[in-house]
Amino acid sequence: MNIILMGCPGAGKGTQAVKLQQMFHLHHISTGDVLRAEIASGSPLGKQIAAIIDKGNLVPDEMIISMLENSVKSTDKGIIFDGFPRTVAQAQALDEMMHRLHHRITHVVMIELPQEEAVRRITSRRQCKKCGEILHIDVKNPLTKCPVCGGELYARPDDTPARAKHRFDVYRQETLPVKNYYQSSGKYVEINGYQEPQKVFEDIEKSLKKNK
Ligand code: AP5
Ligand code: MG
């Protein structure tokens, strides 16, 4: 099973990818996480990447594609791609790579969420620096430490209201055409992301089992 998880910024891709990884023993590749790890390493490449993603723009296709191939080759498990492909050129490069490595994409899952709700979720998201847990904070839930490991929480620099809006503009322009690329493939399903995380997960799980 090789799954592409698509959806707008804040749709719940990361939240669902972790659940799917555990349930189906998959290798999770989040291109956003890979890029943030490069930034955290403090390398010169990381500095270049930070200048792009902190503004909410996409990093160049060639950079993402070359970073991805090593990760795909490093596992013999099925893969869940989270946040990739994000352009039609990336989708074509992924097809070519999978074919060359004798793999294939089996499912493309689009999590649908209205922009207003996605921006609300993004601007109240926190992530744990230590274990990576994704959390949602609000007045009823004023977390200061990670409830899983006690680690420090941080807000992503691209999660401000203005940058979230820009990420949506980029999503509409660059990533929505990827939906058309897969829509007629017979592997594409749309899931309502405007539900409790567990219900979203159950809907995804059902769709994966139906289209085995
Ligand atoms: P990336 O990290 O992939 O960001 P994104 O696509 O904008 O998506 P997010 O991670 O913001 O949201 P998500 O869908 O994972 O939602 P989450 O589960 O966290 O990419 C960041 C940047 O890296 C890009 O802008 C670009 O610059 C660069 N990049 C990445 N990939 C690239 C590529 N392929 N090519 C070029 N550039 C690339 O949930 C959000 C919040 O909602 C959390 O607080 C969570 O707790 C909460 N939540 C989740 N589900 C629910 C629910 N059902 N109900 C209520 N709350 C929920
Ligand atoms: Mg994510």
Image (cartoon, helix red, strand yellow):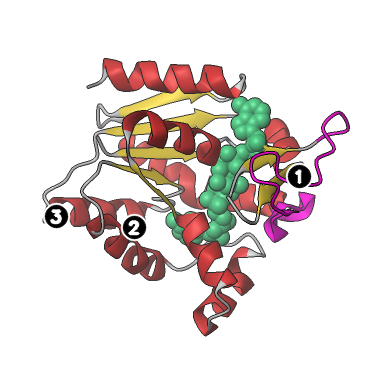
Question: Of helix, strand and loop, which one carries label 3?
Answer: loop
> Magenta span has 155?
yes
> Magenta span has 131?
no
Q: Nearer the viewer, residue 85 or 13?
A: 13
Quadrant of the drawing holding the C terminus: top left
Q: Nearer the viewer, residue 167 or 151?
A: 151
Q: Which residue is mark 1?
A: 123
Q: Which residue is mark 3?
A: 101
Q: Disc 1 or disc 2, which is closer to the eye?
A: 1
Residue 115 x/y as whole percent: 67, 35
Q: CA distance from mark 1 to mark 2?
A: 30 Å
Q: Nearer the viewer, residue 211 or 26?
A: 26
Residue 198 x/y as whole percent: 55, 20
* Label 2 CB-ligand 1 distance < 8 A: no
Q: Earlier in the sequence, mark 1 or mark 2?
A: 2
Question: Residue type at mark 3?
Answer: Leu
Question: Residue type at mark 2?
Answer: Ala
Q: Earlier in the sequence, mark 2 or mark 3?
A: 2
Q: CA distance from mark 3 to mark 1?
A: 39 Å
Q: Earlier in the sequence, mark 3 or mark 1?
A: 3
Q: Main secondary structure of the magenta part?
A: loop
Mark 1 touches mark 2? (CB < 8 Å): no
